[in-house]
Image (spheres, helix red, strand yellow):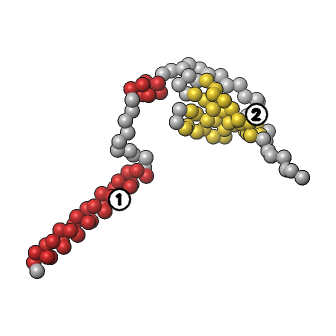
Amino acid sequence: MKAIKILVAGMSLLLVVGLGLLGYGLYGKSRGKSTNVSVSSTASTASVQDFGTVVLPVPMGTRLEQTLTTGERVILRLSHEGSERLLVLDPTTGTVSGSFILTPEVPVR
């Protein structure tokens, strides 16, 4: 009977420790930590290169509403007089990769 009590206590301890480690791992993932991230030397040098000053002409009165970084691109959401525009930039070269002009849809009658 004493051996069974020790065995149950030991397994309970392992269960509590395992749940604690699982909780810690999930908490670390939710904060953006990653345990197995590898960065190549070319990717790390490309992100620190200076591309100088980039001038982006926009109409007078344009507001920068939002800035997003997605993978290898930077997206700027601009608004001007009821219309919106998305500029897609390449941060390694400082060039505009493309743009999207968002216009209201005309209702079909």
Say what secondary structure mark 1 lies in.
helix
Instruction: Tell me the kind of residue under disc 2.
Output: Gly
Q: Residue at x 39, y 26 (%)?
A: 41
Residue reaching furthest to the top: 52
Return the disc, 1 or 2, that comes first in the chain's sequence. 1
Q: Residue at x 26, y 66 (%)?
A: 15
Can residue 64 be seen at all in this image of the molecule?
no
Q: Residue at x 23, y 69 (%)?
A: 12
Inter-mark Cα distance, 1 to 2: 49 Å
Is 88 situated left or right of 39 in this image?
A: right
> Measured from the top left, where is residue 30 in percent x and y?
43, 52
Quarter of the image for residue 63 reads: top right
Q: Residues within 10 Å of mark 1 (few under 14, many from 20)?
A: few
Say what secondary structure mark 2 lies in.
loop
> Measured from the top left, where is residue 8 in percent x and y?
18, 73
Instruction: Tell me the kind of residue under disc 1.
Output: Gly
Reading the image, the residue beneath label 1 is 23
Can residue 67 be seen at all in this image of the molecule?
yes
Reading the image, the residue beneath label 2 is 61
Quarter of the image for residue 67 reads: top right
Quarter of the image for residue 26 reads: bottom left
Q: Residue at x 70, y 35 (%)?
A: 100
> Measured from the top left, where is residue 20 in percent x and y?
30, 60
Residue reaching furthest to the bottom: 1
Is 43 situated left or right of 13 in this image?
A: right
Q: Residues within 10 Å of mark 2 (few under 14, many from 20)?
A: few
**Residue nearer the viewer, 87 or 66:** 87
> Measured from the top left, where is residue 105 in percent x and y?
80, 46
